Image (cartoon, rainbow, N blue to C red):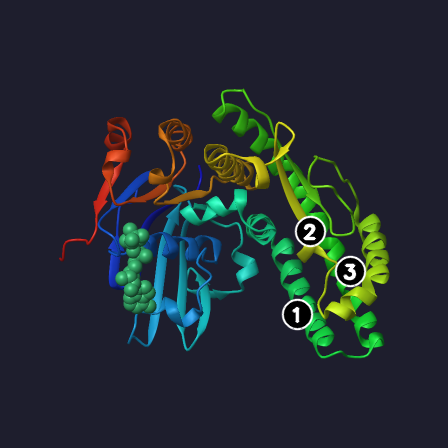
Amino acid sequence: MDLSISHISFANFRSYERFDLDGIGPLTVLVGPNAVGKTNVVEGVQLLTAQSSFRHPPVEQLVRMGAPFARLTADATDGSRQLQLELRIAEGRKRFLLNGKGKRTADLKGLVPSVTFTPDDLELAKGSMAVRRAAIDALGSQLSANHYLIRRDYEKVLRHKNRLLKDEAPASLVAALDETLVMCGAQLACYRAALFEKLSERMASYYAEIADGRERLRACYVPSWEAHDPAAPATFSFGRDDARMALASALAARGGEERARRRALVGPHADRIELFIDGRNVSSFASQGQQRSVVLAFKLAEAALVQDILHQKPVLLLDDVMSELDAARRRALVAFISGDIQTFITTANLDYFDDDLLAAARVVRLPLAEG
Ligand SMILES: Nc1ncnc2c1ncn2[C@@H]1O[C@H](COP(=O)(O)OP(=O)(O)OP(=O)(O)O)[C@@H](O)[C@H]1O
C-alpha cells in the first residue's frame, strides 16, 4: 500500500496561527474565499513532502508575521509504517525531521513524494526555458537524491564562475573552475536527459489522450553544446563521457565570448527543452488550449513517473487549477484523480466540480470553524 497523509498540523505557518486537519482521506477539496489561506495549505504540504515550495519564498516569509518560529507536521501511513514528517523554521533556517530525528534534505527526497500543479505551471508551455529546467530538476530531485545533490553542486560552481567572470578574473582561474563545471555539468545534463526521455514518452501518451489522438506531442532535451534549430524537433543522445567531452570543447570554443559578456553561457543552465505539437514549436505556435493540454500532460506524466520509479504514488496538490481548465481538460484531470491517488485541491468555487467528484471528496471549508 502507498504512503498517504492522514493528518497535517501547522503552527505559525504563513497566515495560520494554528491549522489542523485530521482523518485525511484520498480526496480533499479546500474551498474558501480569496486570501483565506488555501494556497498556504498546499504550500505547507509541498514543503513537508517535496522539501521545497513552488513559490520559492525567502525562509522568513514562511513564518507567521510576528511569530518567532513555525512548525509543520504531517503524519503518513501505509497501514503498517507510521511516519511523521516535520519542518521547523526559526531564525531564517529550515530544519527537517523524520519521526522526531533531524534529517538532511537529501535523505527525505522521495519518501512521500508530491506533484504540485498551480496556475504558474502554465508557464511551462510559453514561459522561459528556466521554468522547464526547474520543473525537471524539481522532479529529478524527488526521484533521486543524487540529482538533487549534483544540481546543488552545479549551481554553486556556476555562481562562483559568474562571479569570476563579472569581476574579470584571470582566464586561468575561470579555466580551473571549468574543470569542476564539466564534471558536475555533464552529470546533471545526463540525469536530466535520461529523466526527460521517460517523462516525454508519458507526456506524449497523455497528450494524445487529452487531444483525442488528433495531435502528437514531441519533446526534446537539447544540451547547451548543440546548435539546434528550434523550428524542428531533433533527438540528442549522449552518455556521461560524451557529455564531458562536448561540454569541455564548447567551453573552450566559447570562453572568449563568456569573458566578453561576463557570464557563463555554456552548461546545463543553458540547456533547452523544446516542445512540439505536430512538428510545430509550442513556444511560438500553440493555442491557449493546446498550451493547457501540454501542461496538463506534463503534470500527469510527472505523477505517473514518480509512481513507476519510486513505486509510491505521489500526493497530488492542485492549487486553483480547475478554473484554468476547460470542461474536457477538467474531465481528463478528474479521471486521473479517480485512479486512487491522494489529492488535495483548492478552489474558490465548487461549481467547477461535478457531483460525482464532490460525493467522493471531503470538502473542507476555510476558514476552519474554531474549536
Ligand atoms: N508570513 C505570513 N504571515 C502572515 N500572513 C501571511 C504570511 N504569508 C502569507 N500570508 C497571508 O496569507 C494570505 C494568502 O493566503 P493564500 O495565498 O493561501 O490565499 P488563497 O486562499 O490561496 O487565496 P486565492 O484564492 O486568492 O489564491 C494573504 O492574506 C497573506 O497576507
Kindly indicate the quadrant of the structure image that contains residue 267. bottom right
Write down the residue under mark 1: 159
Can the viewer see residue 118 in this picture? no
Q: Closer to us: mark 1 or mark 3?
A: 1
Q: Is mark 3 within 8 Å of ligand 1?
A: no
Find numbered disc 2 in the image and state the secondary structure of the residue it sits on: loop
Foreground pick, 132 / 151: 132
Q: Which amino acid type is marked by label 1?
A: Arg
Find numbered disc 1 in the image and state the secondary structure of the residue it sits on: helix
Residue name at image x 45 percent, y 53 percent: 49
Q: Quadrant of the N terminus?
A: top left
Label 3 packing within 10 angstroms: few (<14), some (14-19), many (20+): some
Does residue 348 appear left or right of residue 125 in this picture?
left
The picture places residue 313, in percent across and down from the top left corner, at 47, 39
The picture places residue 265, in percent across and down from the top left corner, at 73, 61
Kindly indicate the quadrant of the structure image that contains residue 200. top right
Q: Which amino acid type is marked by label 2?
A: Asp
Q: Is mark 1 within 8 Å of ligand 1?
A: no
The picture places residue 240, in percent across and down from the top left corner, at 79, 50
Residue name at image x 78 percent, y 47 percent: 226
Label 1 packing within 10 angstroms: few (<14), some (14-19), many (20+): some
Foreground pick, 176 / 163: 163
Write down the residue under mark 2: 271
Q: CA distance from mark 1 to mark 3?
A: 16 Å
Does residue 309 appear left or right of residue 370 in this picture?
right
Can the viewer see residue 127 in this picture? yes
Write down the residue under mark 3: 183
Q: Closer to us: mark 2 or mark 3?
A: 2
Q: CA distance from mark 2 to mark 1?
A: 17 Å
